[in-house]
Image (spheres, grey):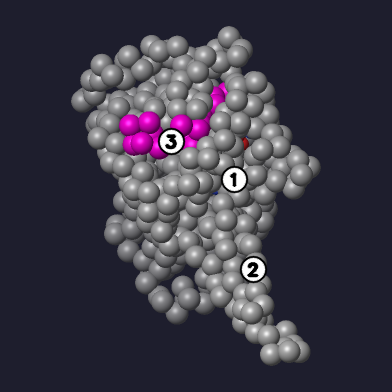
Amino acid sequence: MSQVQVLPAVTAFLQRDHGHFINGKMLQADDPTKIDVVNPATEAVISQISLGNHIDVDKAVTSAHQAFKTSWAVTTPYERGQKLLKLADLMEKYGEELAQLESLSTGKLINLARQLEVQQSVIFMRYFAGWATKITGKTMQPSLPSMQGELYTAFTLRQPVGVVAGIVPWNFSLMIGVWKLASALCTGCTIVLKPSEFASLSLLRLAELSVEAGIPEGVINVVTGDGTTGQCLIESPLVKKVSFTGSVPTGIAIGKLAMSSDLTRVSLELGGKNALAIFEDTNIDEILPRLLMATFVHQGQVCAAPEKFFVHASKYEELVTKLAGALRGMNIGAAMDESSAFGPLSNLPHFNKVKNYLEQVKQRHQIIVGGEVCDRLGYYVEPTLLAVNDAEDPLLNEECFGPVICIIPFENEDRLVEQMNHARFGLTASLWTNNLSRALRLIPKLEVGTVWINMHTFLDPAVPFGGVHASGMGREFADEFIADYTETKSVMMCY
Ligand code: NDP
């Protein structure tokens, strides 16, 4: 046991009367209603946040609009990049604070909060900062007829769309918030973030750091609240783009709302029911640690993580035995305990959802390991391995978003591809093989946004990310985000 001491700065932050971060400062909320922030490892209320209403949202959007038209519009791309780099430095400086806030409010293991949530957010922020000076248009030569010797030329400008609404889920609040914030700011947009009611604290703290980074007031705003707050934000006529990450049903509702709100542009990163396939040429001992990491990182509450394992029949028994052994030996413990390998689920509604999923699958399939709620305080469920009795069961295509592996043997490659594609989602997939020809043959057949070979789940800012089918619309990262945050303006000239 190695319990981390809560920093005095974190204790003080938790005890604050949190309003919304608008126009460079924390403002009192219009509505006095508070939402409890519960530590999922202890079920104790550790803080409270405000429930944003349309008055708070109007203030935030107006301040973002003002900043877009005045301060941020006259900042050079170089300065924008520098300010994002400064913010990244401050995230590093206050990294332990941010990590503890995430861990205490979402049950993320403290080491994961430090190394993935905070450190990767810093890397993403620096990556996007680099883009600020590299956003360019194109030149073209028109073929219009020249009656009197006149000549033509044309070029395009990429101009920021304006105020972005960034709606963030609870699983990686800081990191997903940074994806949206940094994409917006480097392209010249300003932003209003709406974190999940279950994970708002780290983004409120990040917004405060933006003042120290010299980012002008109004450029970054955070309004806390629930789905109604997010809805007010999307309906605002000053919001020109919605960037949403979350569940499929909410994403579909948001897409419709954005379209009916004067065709506000929208990108949607939604859920998945991701599959992986393990072939007969793999060495199970070698891949086991990577499989466990990819699947159980943050207790499986990762949209990109695999939930269905298709395993070649010749490796099935070996994998089941070794996975079962590893799961039985996992150290389940508090998120703020550095020795824990597996923590609680993030919040009560999600805990109930996973519990209900387990009840249903238990009636139809065979539990090899786990399948139960842990007998302790907090929202803990056991890491679970499930042998599938009926591969056609629709439950196997429902996202669990928790620590549950469904394991299914396969023999035939064509049938495997059919089964991997048999879902309304298409976010990620992976192939575990040392046979390069097979990997290259199968990659184009998989209907997903990302295919990994001998790895799964982990994202890099240089590699585009997004889903097909019900897993979303649009791509984040690399140069693919630029078109979403900017409008192309065409200019034609006669001389
Ligand atoms: P939700 O869809 O429930 O919520 C996402 C965000 O939307 C939250 O901030 C939520 O607020 C807000 N929201 C809810 N209803 C509305 C509404 N009607 N209008 C506007 N905003 C609304 O998802 P979760 O937070 O539960 O996150 C889990 C889901 O996110 C999983 O399905 C997972 O697959 C997906 N996800 C996808 C990722 C990807 O990149 N593809 C990455 C991470 C998660 P509040 O929470 O306060 O209700």
Look at the image and give the residue range highlighted in magenta.
Answer: 210-225
Tell which quarter ligand 1 is in: top right
Q: Secondary structure at mark 3?
A: loop
Which quarter of the image is occupied by the C terminus? bottom right
In terms of depth relative to the viewer, which is nearer, 266 or 289? 266
Q: Secondary structure at mark 2?
A: strand
Name the amino acid type tagged 3: Pro
Q: Secondary structure at mark 1?
A: loop
Q: Position of residue 154 (x, y in %)?
A: 62, 75
Q: Earlier in the sequence, mark 2 or mark 3?
A: 3
Question: Does 48 sit left or right of 264 as displayed?
Answer: left
Work out whether residue 51 can be spotted. Answer: yes
Residue position marked by numbered label 3 in the rendering: 216
Name the amino acid type tagged 2: Val
Q: Could you classify mark 3 by the number of other residues whose Cα lies within 10 Å: few (under 14), some (14-19), or many (20 or more)?
A: some
Q: In the image, what residue occupies the spot 43% across and 62% down? A: 134
Please determine whether, in this image, residue 373 is positioned above or below residue 300.
above
Residue position marked by numbered label 2 in the rendering: 491
